[in-house]
């Protein structure tokens, strides 16, 4: 961003899964007494090192919906096939439910976590 070009180096680093916040500031000159520091951030980590990334709630919901969609797509080929015990799987309904769930999850991510679009005037 153009703002980062003029302000210089990053003063904060945070690792969510390691639960570490690094403040690279000079406490005497950059921060005064009674100043507040409020930080919200995420960083991409190697899942082999930090296995906590696999317990992310969004990842679980999104991957479950993708698997459900694929399973529904596979079952559409066998529409009307009756399983032992009289059970009939409806692949079309499963596919449609998963598609709606994916749209809801993606919209939720855009509303909650996506940065607003910057408009250029002039």
Image (cartoon, rainbow, N blue to C red):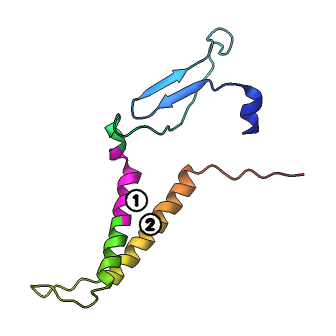
* Residue labelled with disc 2: 102
* Mark 2 burial class by Cα count in 10 Å: few <14, some 14-19, many 20+: many
Q: Quadrant of residue 9?
A: top right
What residue is at 37 percent from the left and 47 percent from the top? 56
Q: Quadrant of the N terminus?
A: top right
Question: Height in image: 5 above or below 101?
Answer: above
Magenta-tinted stretch: 54-66
* Residue labelled with disc 1: 62
Horizontal side of 83 relative to 5 (left or right) equals left
Horizontal side of 12 relative to 69 (left or right) equals right
Q: Quadrant of residue 65?
A: bottom left
Which sits earlier in the primary sequence, circle 1 or circle 2? 1
Separation (CA) of disc 1 from disc 2: 7 Å
**Callout 1 touching callout 2 (CB < 8 Å):** yes
Q: Main secondary structure of the magenta part?
A: helix
Q: Where residue 58 sits: x, y (%)?
A: 41, 52
The local secondary structure at tag 2 comes to: helix
Horizontal side of 4 relative to 82 (left or right) equals right
Q: Where residue 69 sits: x, y (%)?
A: 37, 71
């Amino acid at each position: 961003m153009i703002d980062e070009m003029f302000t210089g180096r990053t003063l904060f680093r945070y690792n969510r899964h390691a639960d570490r916040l690094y403040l690279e500031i000079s406490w005497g000159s950059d921060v005064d007494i009674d100043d507040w520091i409020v930080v919200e951030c995420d960083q991409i980590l190697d899942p082999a090192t930090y296995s906590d990334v696999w317990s992310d709630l969004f990842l679980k919901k999104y991957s479950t919906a993708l698997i459900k969609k694929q399973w529904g797509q596979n079952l559409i080929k066998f529409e009307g096939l009756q399983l032992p015990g009289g059970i009939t799987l409806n692949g079309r309904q499963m596919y449609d439910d998963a598609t709606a769930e994916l749209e809801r999850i993606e919209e939720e991510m855009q509303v909650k976590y996506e940065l607003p679009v910057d408009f250029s005037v002039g």
